[in-house]
Image (cartoon, rainbow, N blue to C red):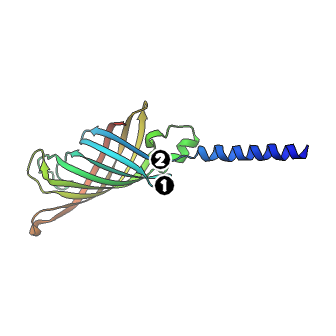
Amino acid sequence: MQRKSIIIMTICLFLALNTTAQEEASVEKSIFGIQAGIMGIWANNEKKLSNTIALRSEIGFEMTGGTINDRKDAPIIPLVLTVEPRYYYDIKKRHSKGLRIDNNSATFISVKISYHADWLMLSGKQPGNIQIMPTYAGRGCIGKHFNYEVGGGIGYQYTFTSIEKQKNDWSFNIVLRIGYTF
């Protein structure tokens, strides 16, 4: 009788450990999608670095109109290349409450690093710039493939002009996007 009890307990323990390992909350291994918002259109990819950190890379066209202190610039739409490490800090909490975490649906903080290329403009003639933008936002799912992001941030912008007129300034990031994940 003791032998059967030991075997049954061992099997139960093995099944419990396997079930727990499979239910671990984590960001997706890799997701690809497109998003559009009031400020532009982007194609993006998020690659898993750890259970709560993903590296987002994107390319798109993003409207800019200068910076907070310089609102005289006409709106321009340059090509933008972005790298953004994202820390989905509440993904485990959402999973434990039974909320959706598919397609990285969770609240995140990130440092968005963007390069607005001056060599491809859809309007205006403006120099390129680099922005470093700490951002706080949330991502959610609508159905299986659609998603949305809402949030914002404020950061630093370095504009490339002639050496005598290089410009550094504060800039802001409004995250209001809707997208499709493939």
Seen in the image, is 87 located left or right of residue 1? left
Point out the residue furthest to the right here: 1
Quick one: 157 or 7, which is closer to the camera?
7
Displayed quadrant of residue 155: bottom left
Quick one: 135 or 41, which is closer to the camera?
41
Amino acid type of the residue that numbered disc 2 sits on in the rendered structure: Val
Marks 2 and 1, how far apart in space?
A: 8 Å
Amino acid type of the residue that numbered disc 1 sits on in the rendered structure: Ser
Do labels 2 and 1 touch, CB within 8 Å?
A: yes
Quadrant holding the C terminus:
top left
Q: State the image coordinates of residue 65 (x, y, percent, origin top left).
A: 17, 48
Q: State the image coordinates of residue 18 (x, y, percent, origin top left).
A: 65, 45
Residue at figure coordinates x 29%, y 49% from the top left: 173
Seen in the image, is 141 located left or right of residue 156? right
Which sits earlier in the primary sequence, circle 2 or circle 1?
Answer: 2
Residue at figure coordinates x 8%, y 51% from the top left: 125
Near mark 2 (Cα within 10 A), the count class, few <14, some 14-19 or many ≥20, is many
Quadrant holding the N terminus:
top right
Residue at figure coordinates x 27%, y 39% from the top left: 37
Residue at figure coordinates x 46%, y 44% from the top left: 106
Near mark 1 (Cα within 10 A), the count class, few <14, some 14-19 or many ≥20, is few
Location of mark 1 (residue): 50
- On screen, 161 above or below 21? below
Secondary structure at numbered mark 2: loop
Task: Give me the disc on residue 29.
Answer: none
Q: State the image coordinates of residue 120 (x, y, percent, origin top left).
A: 13, 50
Point out the residue furthest to the bottom here: 164
Q: State the image coordinates of residue 6 (x, y, percent, origin top left).
A: 83, 47
Location of mark 2 (residue): 27
